[in-house]
Amino acid sequence: MKQWYESLYENYSRKYDKEPFVQGTVGECDFIEQEIKQDKSLKILDIGCGTGRHAIELTKRGYNVTGVDLSEDQIKRAREKAKEAGVTIDFQIQDARNLPFDSEFDLAIMLCEGGFSLMETDEMNFEILKNATKALKSKGKLIFTALNGLFPLFHSVNDFYESAQKEGQSQCKECSFDLMTFRDHNTVVFEDDSGNKRELKCNERYYVPSEITWLLKTLGFKKIDIFGAKLGAFSRQDKLTTDDFEMLVVAEK
């Protein structure tokens, strides 16, 4: 049986590119460049690359990027967009829980919940972190975003989704947050690229900072910094608060 994240991305690449949460690419790539000190000799792995927005932007800036995603439809669209942009990128259909890379990359990125936190068990989510770590060289860096578990303790996730909704875009409804598992169960209503209205039962894992720190320390990361993740404006100046829906994690081996 297909999981919701497999069904969601089957025929939804063009509509996905219009969603509000994917509009911050340029600012997010500015942050990535700062973090690697504009060193164009570094190899970058984009895990859960979707339609390739970060990979394409970084390649246009002169970086060597490999993009992987579970969705055939998203990778197909990523390849089309790279061709339109006149850049050559190695886009591969891969499962982030079982990547073929070993000590090949200087930086791995997983942005906008690129796989991590979407899986149905904590073990599977940890496998994604393990595979990202394994793909990195000995002094490699990992930059990713995760849903901030402090947010639902202080706010209604339902209210947040309602305030963020815009006409013609996907909508999350019937959210219920489970305090024992830190999972948000919801129904996403969206229109696919063929114009069909679809509904999917989804659930995502929220993490608190101490959990992320512990998971990354277990994997051998020496330096772990966590910030608030502002769409399109990632910054080390943004201290994580209970008002941040997402957290930004920067970890170094």
Image (cartoon, helix red, strand yellow):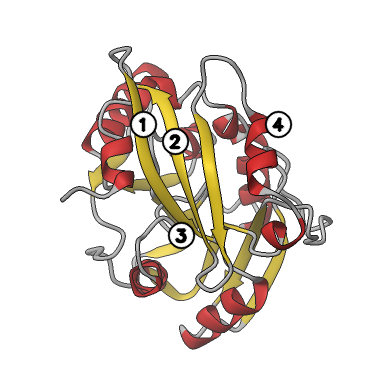
Query: In front: 1, or 227?
Result: 1
N-terminal of the pair, mark 4 or mark 1, is: 4
What's the amino acid at mark 3? Answer: Ser
Q: Which mark is residue 199?
A: 1
Residue 139, given in percent of the width and then of the height, sits at 51, 76
Mark 4 sits on what residue? 163
Q: Are marks 2 and 1 in contact (CB under 8 Å)?
A: yes
For label 1, count other residues whose C-alpha is less than 10 Å away and answer few (under 14), some (14-19) or many (20+): some
Q: Are marks 3 and 1 in contact (CB under 8 Å)?
A: no
Vertical placement of residue 125 versus 35, above or below = below
N-terminal of the pair, mark 3 or mark 2, is: 3
N-terminal of the pair, mark 3 or mark 4, is: 3
**Mark 2 → mark 4, Cα distance in angstroms:** 15 Å
Query: Which element carries disc 1, helix, strand or loop?
Result: strand
Viewer can see residue 144:
no
Query: Which element carries disc 2, helix, strand or loop?
Result: strand
What's the amino acid at mark 2? Answer: Val
